[in-house]
Amino acid sequence: MIEWFTWVQLAVAVLGGLLCLALGLAGRKPSDLTMGATALVEVLLIVQLIIALIAPAVGNHPTGSLLEFYTYLISAILLPVGAGFWALVERSKWSSVILGVACLSVGVMLYRMLQIWTVQGA
Amino acid sequence: MSQGTKKNRVTKKSRGTRVTGIGRLLIAVYGVLALAATGRSFVQIVGKFDEAPLAYTLSALAAVVYIVATVALMRPSTAWYRVAWITIGFEMLGVLVIGTLSLVDPALFPHDTVWSVYGRGYLFIPLVLPILGMWWLSRHRPTGPSESAS
C-alpha cells in the first residue's frame, strides 16, 4: 500500500461523496458529474487493488491482517458498482444521494485499510 | 436552489412498494451495513474463529439478519412487511442488549461484534438504523389485505 496514494484516494472519495450527497439533496438526478466522480472512486480502487497485489512482492508488507484488508478492499470495490447500477436503473435524486453514501462509505473503508496496513492491525 | 415546486409527487403513486423517496436511502444504507457486517464476520470466522466462537457466531447471525432486513424492506408484500418488522426489531433488541452487556461486563464480549458498545465501531449506525427503519415501516404499511400472507 502506498500511503500518499491512499490519502489522495481517500480525499477523492470523501469530496466526491460530499458532492453527490449535496447535488442529490438539492434535487439533482444522477449526472455525468456525479456518475463520473463515482467512476473515479472506482478506478482508484482498482489501482489500489493492483498496488496491494504487487506491494508484498517488493517488500511492502502489511502490518495487520491481509485477509481483513482484502475483505475491506473487495467490499469497497463492490459499493460504487452497486450504487452506479442503481443510478442507471432509477434516475431520481435519491440515486445521487446513494452515490454519495457509497463514496463516503468507501472513504471510511479506505481509512480502515490504511490502518490495517500501516498501524498494527486490530 | 430549486423553488420547491415538486413536493411529494412520488409518494402517492406506488402504494404497494416501500422503495420510494428517502426509503431508498434507508435500503441503501441497510445494504452497506449488511455488506460491512458480512465482511467482518467473514474475516472473524475464517481468520480467528476459535478465539471467540460466541462473539463471532453472533456477528454472523447479525450479518444474516441485516441481509434479510435489506431484502424485506425492498419487497412489497405483507409477508415481507412482517419479516421486515421482525428482523429490524431483532436488530434493535440486539444492539440494545449486546451494547449494554458490553458496557456492563466487558469481559463477556472481549471481541468486537457489530453491536458492541451500541455499534461504536460502525459510527453508531447499527443503533440509529433500526429506529429509522421502524419509523419508516410504521408509515408505510402495505395497503389492504389484498395479498394473503403465507
Image (cartoon, coloured by chain):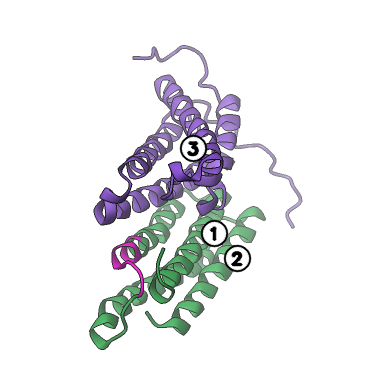
Q: Dot 2 corresponds to which residue?
A: A19
Q: Which quadrant: the C terminus of chain B?
A: top left
Q: Is residue A110 visible?
A: yes
In the image, what residue occupies the spot 55% across and 64% down? A17
Q: Which mark is residue B98?
A: 3
Could you say which is closer to the camera, residue B3 or residue B99?
B99
Chain coloured green: A
Q: Position of residue A20 (x, y in %)?
A: 57, 61
> Would residue B70 appear left or right of B118 to someone viewing this image?
left
Q: Is residue A13 magenta?
A: no
Q: Position of residue B106 (x, y in %)?
A: 50, 45
On the same chain, marks 1 and 2? The answer is: yes
Q: Position of residue B147 (x, y in %)?
A: 40, 15
- Does residue B97 sit above or below A103 in this rendering? above
User: Disc 1: which chain?
Assistant: A
Magenta-colored span: A63-71
Badge 2 element: helix
Q: Amino acid at mark 3?
A: Ile
Badge 1 element: helix
In the image, what residue occupies the spot 50% across and 79% down? A8
Badge 3 element: helix
Marks 3 and 1 sit apart, C-alpha to C-alpha, by 31 Å
Report crowding for label 3: few under 14, some 14 to 19, many 20 or more residues within 10 A (C-alpha). Answer: many
Say which quarter of the image contains residue A85: bottom left
Q: Is residue B12 visible?
A: no
Q: Are marks 1 and 2 in contact (CB under 8 Å)?
A: yes
Could you say which is closer to the camera, residue B18 or residue B56?
B56
Q: Amino acid at mark 1?
A: Gly
Q: Position of residue A86 (x, y in %)?
A: 43, 51
Q: Dot 1 corresponds to which residue?
A: A100
Chain coloured purple: B
Q: Amino acid at mark 2?
A: Leu
